[in-house]
Amino acid sequence: MSSLLWRPVAVLVLMVGAAIAAVAARPTVRVADVGPKVDLETLVPRQFGRWEEDRSIVPLQASPDVQRVIEQTYAQVLSRTYRNAEGQRVMLSIAYGAAQDDSMNYHRPETCYPAQGFPIVQAPRRGAVSLTHGELPVTRLVARQGRRNEPITYWLVVGDEIAHFGLEQRWTTLKYGLTGRIPDGMLVRVSSIDHDNQAAFKMQDAFIADMLDALSPEARGRLLGSLAH
């Protein structure tokens, strides 16, 4: 075969090979389908340490359009308010998606709070919560509506890894995809109403540590990923 004829054949072979490789590498197994099932209602106890659920406080409800997006995106969403003996209150929200992808961004506080009429008044910044299991990477920000000032701490778990939104999230998802698996995702958010942001973040750190210490090893692994081991 002449070189003029061989060149397009070689290109065709490479294209077909790339297409086959892409199909073969496409993730097909959802981690959520092969592991223990997640039940957010029982994952976190209603009472632990100094904290107990305050059922007199109804969590802020999402607007109808945002609620539709949440229902289409997440398999489960848990919203509770906890109160300690000093009367301090902390709001806990956990969103679980059986298939982690960019749709998880809809529940990202930077997105969902402004959609509810809460402008972000302190830009997101990275932080860490000191735990007995190590340093938990988190994101902190502050939203406000009128006189309601709400400091927020949150973190994202992709499969069994904690990752910040953006490149870390996509890279972790890609690593799973290269092994043929689709990771699930867990977004954990803690917030409180307080005009003293630093005091609020300190209280939230204590709440997070108390909550994680009270969980079973399996539940702790769901909220901390490999950091729990």
Image (tube, grey):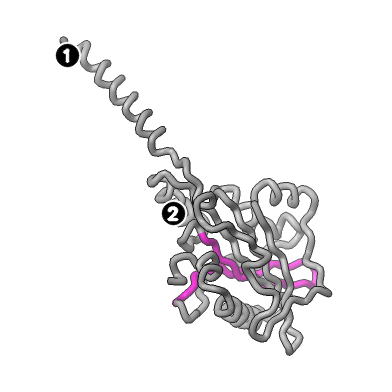
Any magenta on residue 158?
no
Q: Residue at x 74, y 51 (%)?
A: 66
**Which label lies toward us, 1 or 2?**
2
Q: Residue at x 55, y 65 (%)?
A: 155
Residue 190: image location, x then y, percent: 64, 71
Residue 94: image quadrant is bottom right
Q: Which amino acid, mark 1?
A: Ser
Residue 28: image location, x then y, percent: 47, 41
69 displayed left or right of 125: right
The reply to whether residue 126 is visible in this rendering is no
Circle 1: element type? helix
State the quadrant of the N terminus.
top left
Residue 82: image quadrant is bottom right
Q: Which residue is mark 2?
A: 172
Does 70 sit above or below residue 186?
Answer: above
Give the residues in magenta: 134-157
Q: Which residue is mark 1?
A: 3
100 displayed left or right of 90: left
Question: Furthest residue to the bottom?
Answer: 86
Q: Please name the predominant secondary structure of the magenta segment in the image.
A: strand
- Between the C-alphas of marks 1 and 2, the distance is 43 Å
